[in-house]
Image (spheres, coloured by chain):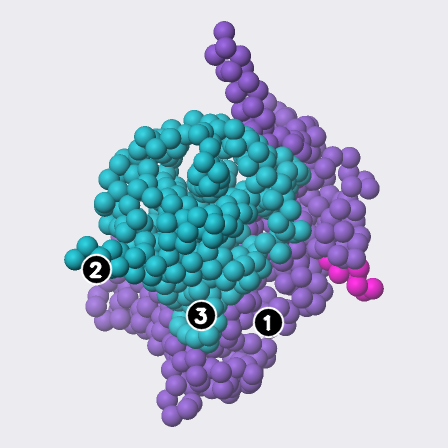
Amino acid sequence: MKDVKISNIQFIFLLVSFIFGNSSVFTLGSGVSQDAWLAYILGWIAGLIIIGVIVYLAKLNQSKTLIGILTDSLGKYLGKSIALIYVVYFIIKGGWVLRTYGEFCKGAGYERTPLVFIISISALVLVYALNNGLEVLARANELLAPLLVTFTLVVTVLLIPEFTFDNFLPVFESSLGNILISSSTIACFPFGEVMVFLMIFPYMANEEKLVKFTYMTTIIIGFVIFISILRDLLVLGPELIDITIFPTNIVVGIVPSIQIQPPLLTAVYLIGCGIKAYVYVFAAITAITEIFGFDDYKPLVIPVTTLNVVIGMWIYDNVFEMLHSVTRNVPYIFLIFQFIIPVIMLIITIVKKQNKKQTIS
Amino acid sequence: MVDKKLMLLIIILVIPSLLLGCWDNRDFSEVSIVSAVGLDLTDDNKIIATLQIVKPSQLKGQQEGSSNNERATWVHSSKGDTVVEALRNQLNVVNRIMDYSHLQLLVIGEKFAKESIVDVLSSFESGTETEKEINVVIAKGMSAERILRAESELETVSVMHIKDIIDNSRIRATMNDSRMMDILKDIATPGLNSTVSVIETVREEPELEIKDLRIEGLGIFKKDKLVGYFDKNPTKGLLFAINEVDGGIIAIKNPLNENKNICTEILDCEGKIKAEVVNNEPKLSIGVRMISEIECQQGSEDLTSVALIKELEKRIKEKVIEDITKALNSAQKEYKSDVFGFGKVLYKTNLKYWNEVKDNWDDIFSDTKVNINVSVEMKRSGLLKRSLDKK
């Protein structure tokens, strides 16, 4: 499988779809009313720091996946057992992405369609794409990712007449503590999730440029998400942002004259969440393959995707739990995987490199 | 051969994914389309929901161009403890499941509005079916049901008639278009009380028609409760101040002949609410800039000299100030409700001061003098300089 290579532009678009993914289903930074944009910017900056650790780690360990890095720096047994925990993390995250998409569909239109049906149908597409490999998906995504960005920007432009610019004011009504809590969740989700790309970086054709590309993409897509948060805030106002479950859905429905945007929005989320779930499942499968030294990951596709669907169904009892977890508890647990372990890896790698240099000299 | 089987499999798998939305599919012929909802509160706190349902047969008739005098809508009321329950109870009588996606108008009875408007609106806001841009009106001094039963001679679906009148409100300058979302936003904004347009009867008839209704004026709210009404003139004044006017007629006396009138049209009107804090005292003012033209004139005097145009501008200005003062007086003295949004401006610009006064803002607002600055510019007079001389 190592001979699969994705080009620069394919990598950029993959990262765009991944970060955009299910993050816009929720209003990032809600809970601090009109200071949401401020919380977002802080979270964005913190996210860039987390991503900095991840790309630096990848740069020092070129052509090695996360599993390779773990086993090299922690030894075979400890490295592989932590790698297994990562596999669980990827599968849970993948299931969670499917669940958020399904929950959005149910909330926004398919009221009577059973959740399991929506999720499994999406998973079927996932299985098909996984069987075809990363390259096929990356190429398909070249067409799909621009749609995500274009849709967001077009809707924003169409809504300019509805903007109320004093919705920003008064700045800093919520306390700094609340803003920081809100921004720390944004740092974990969506930016911290880029960690999973440690499994993807080795497939890049131009791996030496990964730092530049990752940063460029994160800044561009971060800006697009920023625009969509501003738009929601300017159209709905601070209070409605805080009380609506899927604000974007309402905002998009306000666009005058044409009435096709809500279905389009669902389609856009299908693309975003589909790509995101794909990346997670792909990471989980390739990780398992590498840990146990299998030749081919294809036999794993159906079992792991099925596991994803099941976890997606089990992970929350209701939509309230899901919303609560996104904005409050779970991101901190994920921070261990996204930041703390990579930092430890990074330190070990640097120390090892220096030892090597010393022994050579 | 294998490829063909694979293709078949893919097609079988893809088709269900395209048909997700058909899970609870309801054909057009199986739903009844609701054009308007009216909500009333009874004395024992029950909610009466009235629906105006479009008759499907009548819709068909319209398409073929036939004109029969039968009513195109069917109106029925049902009772319940909550709004949603009352609406659902309609199914005890109506055979087809209601479809609210074409809802045009929400009429709220006076008694209900006095209780709480948020309860009503949030139950509509929460539903995924309704558009968030439906207009809301208050039935002044009568039940919402009667408005829905009023017939129109111009439109087959009578509520479309009312809806179109509301849509023209920006050039009539006598009411808001009061979209549901805007009302909710206003209620949630600190320091701003919301206003909702009003419908009342002019002539009491057993069978009301739209022409017996007056769709004009605003209901004044305090938080989410209706406290009173503005009639035509104060409404105009309020709308001038909060920049909700794009057009409208102002009639003034002809300066050369006091028995005759001159009608002027507003071409552009910009209102601004200002509030600042000086020495810990709020300083409130209203600024209005207006551009107008002479639309028609009684009497044949030539009004186009510079001095006379100045005089006309002065008279319009007095008229506008009069309207705004009326609105201010009744908002400050009668209802003690800050519908202008001075408090909102303070909240946005001076949060510290606002936190001190927010609990008794309505009282402070009522006792504070408001400066009104109006500037009027008379730009043109259509194609004529003056009326025809009668010789």
Q: Which residue is mark 1?
A: B223
As drawn, the residue found furthest toward the left would be: A361
Residue B36: x %, y % from top left: 64, 46
What residue is at 53 percent from the left and 24 percent from the top? B14
Amino acid bearing label 1: Lys
Q: Residue furthest bottom?
A: B279
- Decide: is A277 above or below B199: above
> In the rendered image of this protein, which colour is used for chain B?
purple
Tell which tag, 1 or 3, sits nearer the viewer: 3
Task: Tell me which chain appears cyan.
Answer: A
What residue sits 82% from the left and 42% below the top?
B92
Q: Is residue A86 above or below residue A179?
A: above
Say what secondary structure mark 3 lies in: helix
Displayed quadrant of residue A276: top left
On screen, residue B356 versus residue A11, left or right, reads right
Given residues A275 and B168, the one toward you in this image is: A275
Residue position marked by numbered label 3 in the rendering: A179
Question: Toward the viewer: B367 or A153?
Answer: A153
The residue where tag 2 is placed is: A358
Q: Amino acid at mark 3?
A: Ile
Binning the other alpha carbons within 10 Å of mark 2 as few (below 14), some (14 to 19) or many (20 upward) gives few
Q: Quadrant of the C terminus of chain A?
A: bottom left
